Every structure is written in C-alpha cells, then in structure tokens.
Amino acid sequence: GEGGIVVTNDEALMVRMKDIAARLDLSQTTVSHVLTGKHQQYRISAKTVERVKKMAEALGYRSSALARAFRDRRSYSVTLAVEDLTNPFWTGVAIGAEKEAEAHGYVLVVSNTGGNAGREGRSVQMLQERRVDGLIVSPVTIADPALLQLRKVGLPFGQIDRSVKGADIPCVRTDHLAGSQLAVDHLVERGHRRIAILTGPLTVQTFEIRLEGFRKALARHGLKPAAVELIVPEAAEAEECVRRLCASKERPDALYTTNIWMTLGALRAIRASGIPVPAEMEVVGFDDISMADLFALPVSTIVQDVEAIGRESFRALLKVMKGQKVPRETLIPPKLKVR
C-alpha cells in the first residue's frame, strides 16, 4: 500500500508517508527508508534524515510503530514462513499469529515457502540482515542447516508445527500423538479392526509423529495396522493409493488420513468404488475440512486449534526476542469432530 499508519493521538489522524514526502519534496521511498531506520544502509544524508524526523514528529508519528523503529532501530515486524498457504491449516495459523502480533504493535510478514529450502532461505536472510526483528518458521527438513546456523549465531527465531531434530529451539505445535490416539479410539469404538493409515514422508516430522501415535494407539487396543501407506501427501496420490486398497482382498474397514489433501483423495476413491461409508469403510482425517458436513460421504476429523498455534508461536518468539526462557515445546491439544 502507501505505507500508511494510524497514529494513536486524540484525533486518530491517518498519516501517510506520501504526505510527508510531498511536504518535503522528497520521494516516498526516501521517507520510508528514514522512518524504518534504513537511512544508513541507503546513504541518506543526515540533513535529510533530520528533516524527515522533524516532519514525522510534527504530524504525530511519535507514538507510532515507525517512530519506535526510528528511535531504537527495530523494524517492529516479524516473518512467518510457512509451507503452503493454500492449506487452510496454515491460513488459520497466519491469522492467529497476525492478531497476536498486532496486539503487541508488530507487523507480520507472511512467506509461503512451498517446502522449498531456497524460499525458506530468503526469510532467513531477512532476519540475518535485520530487516525483521524475528522469524517464526516451519522447517523444510528435520536437519535444516540454515536454521541451525541461526541458532549458532543467536538470532531470534522460533519453530511452528515441526522442528529441527536435536536442536534446543522453541517449537509450538499440535499434540500429534494425542490426535492419532483420538482417531484410533474413535474408529475402534465404531467397531473397526482393520485400520490403515495414509501418511507422508517420514523426513517430515509431522507425519513421523502422527504415524508413531497411530501405531501406539493401535497397540493399546491389541491391534496392528491393516496397512501403512507412505505416499506423497497430495490428493491424486492418495486417490490412487486408496483405489488399490479398496480393490484388495485384505481391504481395510477404516482409514486414517494424515493431511487434508489425503483425506479428499481418499474420499474420491471410496466414492468411485461404491463402498458404503461408514458401514464398510470409515475415514478419519487430520485437519478439518470446510463444509465437510455437506459431503455425501461423512468424514470425521481431528481439528487443530490453528489460531492458538499461531498466537502461541508469536508469544514464544516475543519471549525469545526479549531474552526470556521459552519451553522447548508447546503442545496445543486437538479435538475430534465426529460426523
């Protein structure tokens, strides 16, 4: 936008950077660099800096986040780097983090990594260059050298949903073990005994923990998995996998799908097979699906408190930035929504 900010004075005046630029006959870019503490980086003269500062103060910037940034050279912004913003889970997390950030006077910059180390690296670089004050990140891999380097040099960041193995870095996530327990208990209570799981690559910590929870929960009931399918966590892959399971002589009578896309793919395959749901095959998916109650095939879901995850991840980062003690893990309990 135009770089506007609401000033918290009595008139609740809206001051825009372009207003300051117009009054001083400067470019809006120059004003922005000064007010965000980047004037040295862009070699803006001390005279120009002083002119911008005086005009900003005259127009009421003293109480704004930009004035604070000018005063103590902090950006009052943090980056949230997540895997896939087309996934409603991450959208909900971003909303929760944004609300909490705004409540503390920060701007949240959301980056969609697509599970790509290069894209994650750009968010890491923003922190290294101090263009943002902190970073909340969902690691691309369980052995992430870029994040380990951040830890080594002491730059402030926290993890969300998954974590780098063996590193003492705060992480906020759902209690995936508890979620798998809820799914298995529900299916067993419904009378199912041949329960299969669809899960993603075990290099992704989320899938690893959900599979571990599934195995442990089945063992408590004296059962073994009917099938463990490690697939690419996408709808098309899940649909093909479930088509095979439906045609098998040892067909499972229930499926536990560990992400939203796998759930959708599984439901397509079951519908195509004509198998009665839930009488002969029931599905529990991890992550709720919007309007699932309108589906022709009922699907129960493990619901994550996405806004709480986003909110707590920002709170954890804020403590890290202040040098306060933060738990290694903060687990948010999930719930089962039965349909």
Image (tube, rainbow, N blue to C red):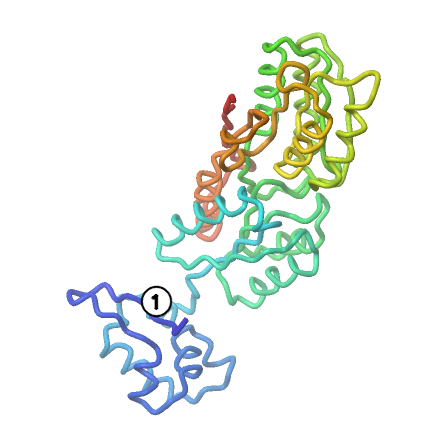
Answer with left or right where residue 66 lies relative to residue 39. Answer: left
Closer to us: 178 or 149: 178
Residue at 59% x, 31% y is 286
Amino acid type, label 1: Arg
Q: Quadrant of residue 228?
A: top right
Residue at 32% x, 68% y is 5
What percent of the width, then of the height, locates residue 248?
83, 21
Number of residue marks: 1
Closer to us: 177 or 146: 177
Name the image quarter holding the N terminus: bottom left
Q: Mark 1: give few (<14), some (14-19) or many (20+) Cα within 10 Å.
A: some
**The furthest residue to the left:** 10
Which residue, given by chain and number where applicable, does mark 1 sit on? 68
In the rendered image of this protein, does residue 306 appear above or below residue 42?
above
Q: Quadrant of residue 12?
A: bottom left
In the rendered image of this protein, does residue 177 appear above or below residue 190?
below
Q: Quadrant of residue 209?
A: top right
Residue at 57% x, 65% y is 126
What percent of the width, then of the height, locates residue 283?
63, 24
What percent of the width, then of the height, locates residue 222?
71, 7
Residue at 54% x, 46% y is 90
Which structural element holds mark 1? Answer: helix
What percent of the width, then of the height, locates residue 32?
41, 77
